[in-house]
Amino acid sequence: MQHFDNASTGDIVLSVADRIIENRAYLSEIDGKIGDGDHGVNMAKGFGMAAERIRGNDMSLATAFDTLGTVLMTEIGGSMGPLYGVMFTQFAETIEKSSSIDAKTFSAMLTSGLDGIQAIGSAKVGDKTLLDTLVPAIDAFNSANADGKPFPEALDALVVAAEKGRDGTKDLVARIGRASRLGERSLGVLDAGATSCALILKALALGAKQKMQLPAA
């Protein structure tokens, strides 16, 4: 069975942090068109602070997720901190007792994170939020699993769907948050949360594939 270890794979979260920090200016530029313009700055701050605590400590993936989630919930501003914070802490809680992570566990982890976000927010798919990336990505991952695709191929499907969902937010009218005040004027612009979510999922997928232990031929 294709899987990767939970122990000592916390550096996957470091690669996620790197992608967010690299895209700080881009995320804030997108956010500035219909929002506060601080999404990239706040995200980079939170992910950077968490990375400092994770780096060099040989953490499990679960512990690294918990570290990141706690920082995002407690130490950065903006609306996205609590949403991503609960997502990552739910990730951590779901996998903390798993010594290895296979496709089924990874799916449960993603679903738990989504449930956490939906428990504290009122957004739905189509409201021009990160859910327009996260929900189709999870659906695509689960569909690939149901079709018997290998774990790495299911991760590829997740990334493709995430990026398609992100791109689709250009055609949506914002219905949640500051951008919702713009009404139809929010059309034609990517949602910053959907964009950062696509970056996170792609980095997670790549990190998981790099750590994966493939069965011997």
Image: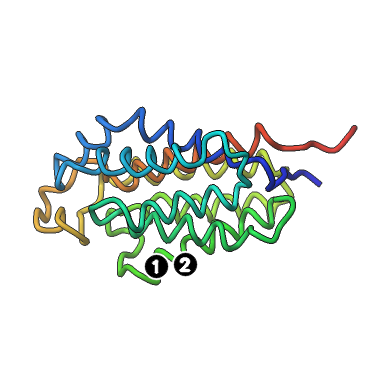
Residue 135 horizontal/vertical position (percent)? 45, 56
* Screen quadrant of the C terminus: top right
> Identity of the amino acid at label 2?
Asp
Give the left or right position of residue 34, taking residue 203 as reference: left
Residue 190 horizontal/vertical position (percent)? 26, 41
Q: Residue 214, located in which quarter of the rendered image?
A: top right
Q: Which mark is residue 213?
A: none
Residue 62 horizontal/vertical position (percent)? 59, 52
**Front in this rendered view, residue 9 or 187:** 9
Give the left or right position of residue 136, taking residue 42 as reference: right
Reading the image, the residue beneath label 1 is 118
Q: Residue 87, located in which quarter of the rendered image?
A: bottom left
Other residues around mark 2 within 10 Å, as few (<14) / some (14–19) / many (≥20) = some
**Front in this rendered view, residue 50 or 147:** 50
Q: Residue at x 25, y 56 (%)?
A: 79
Q: Are marks 1 and 2 in contact (CB under 8 Å)?
A: yes
Reading the image, the residue beneath label 2 is 115
Give the left or right position of residue 98, taking residue 85 as reference: right
